[in-house]
Amino acid sequence: MSEILLETQDLALAYGGFRAVDGVNLSVKAGTIHSVIGPNGAGKTSLFHCLTGGRKPSEGSIFFNGADITHRPAHARVGIGMARSFQVTSLFQNLSVRENLRLAAQGCDGDKALAFWRPVGAGKAHIATAERVMERLGLAAKANTAAGDLSHGQQRVLEVGMALCGEPKLLLLDEPTSGMGIDDIPIMTHLIAELGKDHTVMLIEHNMGIVMTISDTITVMSRGQILVEGKPDAVRADERVRAAYLGEAAV
Ligand SMILES: Nc1ncnc2c1ncn2[C@@H]1O[C@H](COP(=O)(O)OP(=O)(O)OP(=O)(O)O)[C@@H](O)[C@H]1O
Ligand SMILES: [Mg+2]
């Protein structure tokens, strides 16, 4: 598949006078797992903020499915099929896995979620979505467990599931394995690889084992700019990438 789902043109985000994202031209093909890597402070999360609407870019444009979404608010981007993984704190710790997912499905329904006149069937659809996502996550056995009683790794998996409930075209995951124990990492790796079969996934990840295994394309950022882009083998062999990471270690 070579259709472009997401594209940025000369995208920039400045915090005061500092350009955290500095002229990024990115193309993400539909149906691929596209990872964004780079040393700490390279601008990866800032790029995601621009893509999801959390921050207004200082310059440049963002196109999703061919439409210019640069000025659309975050909630409108969710409505057209963009979702980012939630932070741990956004899980309802006292509610069950099933209830968390049902509420996420309801929340992703936009304005309809609050409409008391919505068709009776809507609630059933949210329950069905929650059940399907739970299966997908491998959390069906934990359906009635409170989110707060899950292991940290399972909570991170559930966060990815919350984003999935809106049935997004593009899933943006910012360090989904951060803080995970070594035993849980293969579960998340497998989940992302599986999701990549029927979603487009953008992944920020520091674990090179995961990135090199599951990515179709890797964009390497350094100092707000794209340093290198290509397939895993080419990126792994690129001296400029090595130098960027070594530069970070030397600081
Ligand atoms: N709200 C902010 N105000 C000012 N500077 C910021 C802000 N957020 C991030 N920065 C700076 O912008 C740069 C890019 O930060 P960003 O969080 O995008 O990097 P990153 O590539 O995600 O790094 P990491 O791998 O550590 O998560 C860093 O130098 C950071 O200190
Ligand atoms: Mg970051």
Image: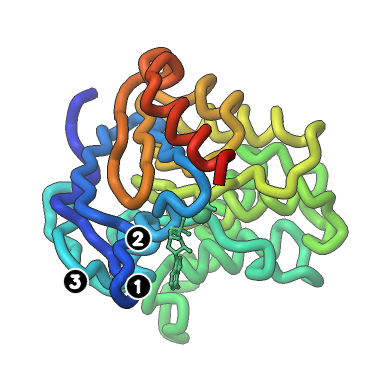
The x, y position of residue 94, in whole percent, is 81, 71
- The answer to whether 101 is drawn above or below residue 188 in the figure is below
Q: Answer yes or no: do the residues labelled 2 and 3 have beta carbons within 8 Å?
A: no
Question: Quick check: can you spot residue 248?
Answer: yes
The type of residue carrying mark 3 is His
Cα distance between the residues tagged 2 and 3? 19 Å
Mark 1 lies on a secondary structure that is strand
Indicate the colouring scheme. rainbow
Q: Earlier in the sequence, mark 2 or mark 3?
A: 2
Any mark on residue 71, and which? 3
The x, y position of residue 244, in whole percent, is 43, 35
- The answer to whether 85 is drawn above or below residue 232 in the figure is below
Any mark on residue 166, and which? none
Q: Which residue has dot 2 on it?
A: 20
Q: Earlier in the sequence, mark 1 or mark 3?
A: 1
Q: Answer yes or no: do the residues labelled 1 and 3 have beta carbons within 8 Å?
A: no
The type of residue carrying mark 2 is Ala
For the residue pair 184 and 76, the one nearer the viewer reads as: 184
Q: Which residue has dot 1 on it?
A: 15
Q: Residue furthest bottom?
A: 116
